[in-house]
Image (cartoon, rainbow, N blue to C red):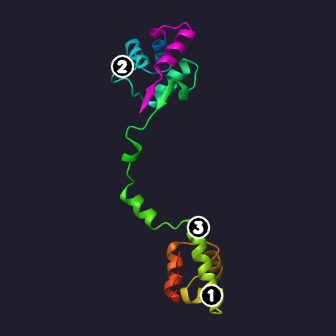
Amino acid sequence: MIKPNTELMRQRREMFDLSQQEVAFRLQALGYPISDNHYSRIERGSNGYNNIQLETAFAIAKVLKYTVDDLFIFQPENEVDSFSPSPEYKERMANHMTKEKKLKVGQAIRDFRKKNKLSAKDIAEKTGMATSYVYHIEKGYGSKKAVQQIIDAFNIKIKV
């Protein structure tokens, strides 16, 4: 929601010694079909005129030679706690490993490899990965799928 800062808009208009009609005329000259009545309602924050389009906000800011951030108040239309992530986002986040977790899992794979006197090449051959990718995983990079492939291939138990 983009609400006008009505007091500041009025002050800026009066500072340039402009009437609401003159502001509307200048907006029309910029290609915005806003009547003086429409502009007056925006400036007063009348019902139905307290949520304007972003393009209109920029045009008014240009005419009044001020920043959009000062002339308008940007508010979400819903309360923050009413926003809920989409099912796709939830699924993506459920499959997402944080960098910290990836580092711990990678270190655990490396510890397992060294404890069992395996080389990165041994792991790569058993999983079908490139040796360099095994090192990559051990450093905390790589996909969750690739990490799981190593864990499954060697039956590694990891506590994170």
Residue found at x 40% / y 64%: 91
Q: Which residue is mark 1?
A: 113
- Residue at disc 1, secondary structure: helix
User: Residue 20 falls in which quadrant of the image?
Assistant: top left
- What residue type is disc 1 on? Arg
- Residue at disc 3, secondary structure: helix
- Residue at disc 2, secondary structure: loop
Q: Which residue is mark 2?
A: 46
Decide: few, some or many residues near mark 3? Use Cα within 10 Å; few <14, some 14-19, many ≥20: few
Q: Nearer the viewer, mark 3 or mark 1?
A: 3
Percent coordinates x, y for residue 98 in the rendering: 54, 65
- What residue type is disc 3 on? Glu
Percent coordinates x, y for residue 71 in the rendering: 52, 24
How many numbered discs sit on the rendered protein? Answer: 3
- What residue type is disc 2 on? Ser
Residue found at x 58% / y 22%: 66
Is 134 left or right of 145, judged from the image as shown? right
Question: Up-down: is 33 above or below 94?
Answer: above
Which stretch is magenta? 1-22
Percent coordinates x, y for residue 110 in the rendering: 63, 82
Q: CA distance from mark 2 to mark 1?
A: 70 Å
Residue found at x 62% / y 92%: 116
Q: Identify the disc placed on residue 47.
A: none
Q: Is residue 86 visible?
A: yes
Q: CA distance from mark 3 to mark 2?
A: 51 Å
Is 26 left or right of 135, judged from the image as shown? left
Instruction: Specify which label sits upstream in the sequence, 2 or 1.
Output: 2
Q: Which residue is mark 3?
A: 100
The residue most toward the bottom is: 117
Is 47 left or right of 155, judged from the image as shown? left
